[in-house]
Amino acid sequence: MLLGDMRLREIFIFSMVCLLGVQAWAEDSALERLVNSPRHQEWVNIEFDGGSIKAFLVFPEVTGKVTAVLVIHENRGLNDWARSVADRLAEEGYLAIAPDLISGMAPDGGGTSDFPTTDDARKAIYELKPDFVTAALNATANYVKAIPPCNGRLAVGGFCWGGSQTFRFATNRGDLSAASVFYGRAPESGIEHIVCPVYGFYGEDDNRINATIPETEKWMKENGKTYDPVIYDGARHAFMRRGETETGEMPNRRAMMSAWQRWLYLLGKI
């Protein structure tokens, strides 16, 4: 459905969710956000049957236990922007963890930041086997759910390649509270195993991905699953990242800000 068709109740709530804070964040670069963040950030090693990865973990500055959010990066790996998403979520009170799914694949066993170019990182992403990705995500989910600050609830959200992996992970993980798919495709099988609601975030000018939405809606409905896609007017693929570098009333920037409001609202419902 188009953003203009969203329920009035939700639109009202979205407008109440820290709009000024989202605007200020969008003006900062990802690296500046990470360097200036007052929140505790750390890298953790996660081992599992079949391999090991590093993950970026950010703790919120709150009292009590909180919901965890697993962030799945784009097809260029866990760059500063993806890590800044985790920090932004922690700022909003969530325990955020972002695995580097190409850990150990760069020269000398490094991760995303150690590849010579982003194209090299992208090539490594597409060499990953689905079973490895599932195992790595399950291990990351198990890790974050087991640490003391987590209240036992877990949501997942991902972008581009990570959006597709988010949808697929929902078919493999039965304890997710929500899956937020940012411009990603549905998997070709396994939809019947999805337990949590799946929320879609799409740019209007992204025909490659949007052409798959009607069939996804059909599959999800036939299997009795919750799927709520929103298409943002005039936005393109990767508008969450692109929107941070745009100013004024550019479509990607508007979409990024609206999508952040929606995502935070949906996480708040958990």
Image (tube, rainbow, N blue to C red):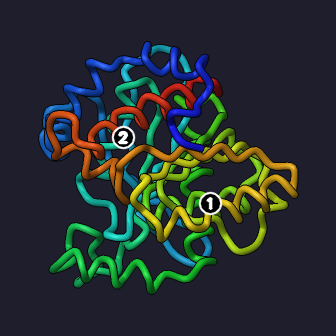
**Which residue is disc 1 drawn over?**
213
How many residues crowd around disc 1 within 10 Å: few (fewer than 14), some, or many (20 or more)? Answer: some
Q: Position of residue 93 (x, y in %)?
A: 44, 24
Q: Position of residue 157 (x, y in %)?
A: 51, 48
Q: Is residue 255 above or below residue 108?
A: above
Q: Is residue 135 above or below residue 25?
A: below
Describe residue 236's horizontal placement relative to residue 2 as left or right. left
Quadrant of residue 216 within the rendered picture: bottom right
Q: How many marks?
A: 2
Quadrant of residue 217 within the rendered picture: bottom right
**Which residue is disc 2 drawn over?**
255
Where does the C terminus fall, quadrant-wise? top right
Amino acid type of the residue that numbered disc 1 sits on in the rendered structure: Ile
Amino acid type of the residue that numbered disc 2 sits on in the rendered structure: Ala
Q: Position of residue 11 (x, y in %)?
A: 52, 21
**In terms of depth relative to the viewer, which is nearer, 70 or 167?**
167
